[in-house]
Image (cartoon, helix red, strand yellow):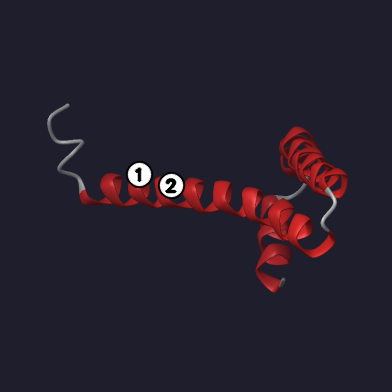
Amino acid sequence: MKAIYKNKAFLFITSSHFIHKIAETLYDLAIPLLVLHATGSSLLMGAMYALGFFAEFLVSFFGGAIVDSVNRKKLLMFISTL
């Protein structure tokens, strides 16, 4: 157990995941604030935040089932072409 914190790969993956989560949270906050600044409407800001949350929910809810049902090789080739 002592070697897990000395493992550079583990520290790299953990720190990159932490930085990614911070950036994702800031992005999720910034988009509705940009809508508020551009339109001045708090109703549109709330709608934008709700739509973003709903889109993430749908992708995470159905994404696993879709990924499990398709050929992984074809899926990776498709994703790499985007």
**Quick one: SS at disc 2?**
helix
Q: Residue at x 63, y 48 (%)?
A: 29
The image shows residue 15 at horizontal and vertical percentages of: 34, 48
**Quick one: SS at disc 1?**
helix
Furthest-front residue in view? 40
Query: Dot 1: within a 10 Å radius of its alpha carbon, few (fewer than 14), some, or many (20 or more) residues?
Result: few
The image shows residue 14 at horizontal and vertical percentages of: 35, 44
Q: Quadrant of residue 80?
A: bottom right
How far apart are the two marked residues, 2 and 1, measured between alpha carbons?
Answer: 5 Å
Residue 77 vertical placement versus 22 (above, below): below
Q: How many numbered discs, if any?
A: 2
Q: Residue at x 72, y 71 (%)?
A: 82
Q: Nearer the viewer, residue 70 or 27?
A: 27
Residue 67 vertical placement versus 1 (above, below): below
Q: Residue at x 76, y 44 (%)?
A: 49
Determine contact: label 2, label 1, CB under 8 Å: yes
55 vs 13, left or right, is right
Q: Nearer the viewer, residue 44 or 13?
A: 44
Amino acid type of the residue that numbered disc 1 sits on in the rendered structure: Thr
Query: Dot 2: within a 10 Å radius of its alpha carbon, few (fewer than 14), some, or many (20 or more) residues?
Result: few
Residue wearing tag 1? 14
The image shows residue 66 at horizontal and vertical percentages of: 79, 41
Where residue 79 is drawn, which disc sits there?
A: none
Residue wearing tag 2? 17
Amino acid type of the residue that numbered disc 2 sits on in the rendered structure: His
Q: Quadrant of residue 78?
A: bottom right
The image shows residue 16 at horizontal and vertical percentages of: 39, 52
